[in-house]
Image: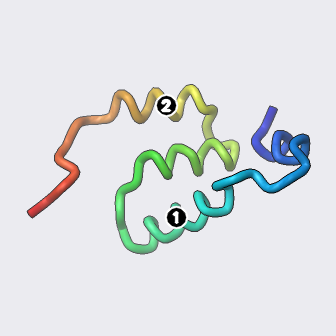
């Protein structure tokens, strides 16, 4: 079932769906890397399934989250 179909089946607002889109667009505009948001955005927009999104997150290269 696609996220759109799931939303229609629920018949109400799905918490975080619009916030994810806004956060994704802001991160893209500002050049900020947000891999969790990017994965959720991709799932919501039928670009990738949830299992693949989690796999991408868990297998990405480690790096420092803070730069000084």
Helix, strand or loop under label 1: helix
- Disc 2 to disc 1, how far (Cα)? 19 Å
Q: Which one is earlier in the sequence, the residue at label 2 or at label 1? A: 1
| Residue at 87% across, 43% down | 10
Q: Residue furthest left?
A: 68
| Residue at 82% across, 46% down | 7
Give residue 27's quadrant in the image: bottom left
Q: Please provide percent x and percent y for residue 33.
A: 36, 57
* Disc assigned to residue 54: 2
Q: Please provide percent x and percent y for residue 14.
A: 75, 51
Image vertical order of residue 7 relative to residue 21, above or below:
above
Image vertical order of residue 40 relative to residue 27, above or below:
above
Binning the other alpha carbons within 10 Å of mark 2 as few (below 14), some (14 to 19) or many (20 upward) gives few
Q: Please provide percent x and percent y for residue 68.
A: 8, 63
For disc 1, the marked residue is 23
Total of numbered circles in the picture? 2
Please state, as top left, top right, bottom left or bottom right, where the N terminus lies in the image: top right
Q: Is residue 65 left or right of residue 19?
A: left
Q: Is residue 57 left or right of residue 43?
A: left
Binning the other alpha carbons within 10 Å of mark 1 as few (below 14), some (14 to 19) or many (20 upward) gives some
| Residue at 18% across, 56% down | 66
| Residue at 46% across, 27% down | 55
């Amino acid at each position: 079932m696609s996220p759109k179909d799931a939303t229609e089946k629920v018949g109400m607002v799905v918490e975080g769906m619009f916030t994810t889109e806004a956060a994704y667009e802001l991160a893209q505009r500002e050049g900020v890397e947000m891999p969790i948001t990017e994965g959720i955005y991709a799932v919501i927009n039928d670009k990738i399934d949830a299992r693949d999104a989690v796999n991408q997150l868990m297998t990405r290269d480690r790096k420092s989250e803070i730069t000084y």
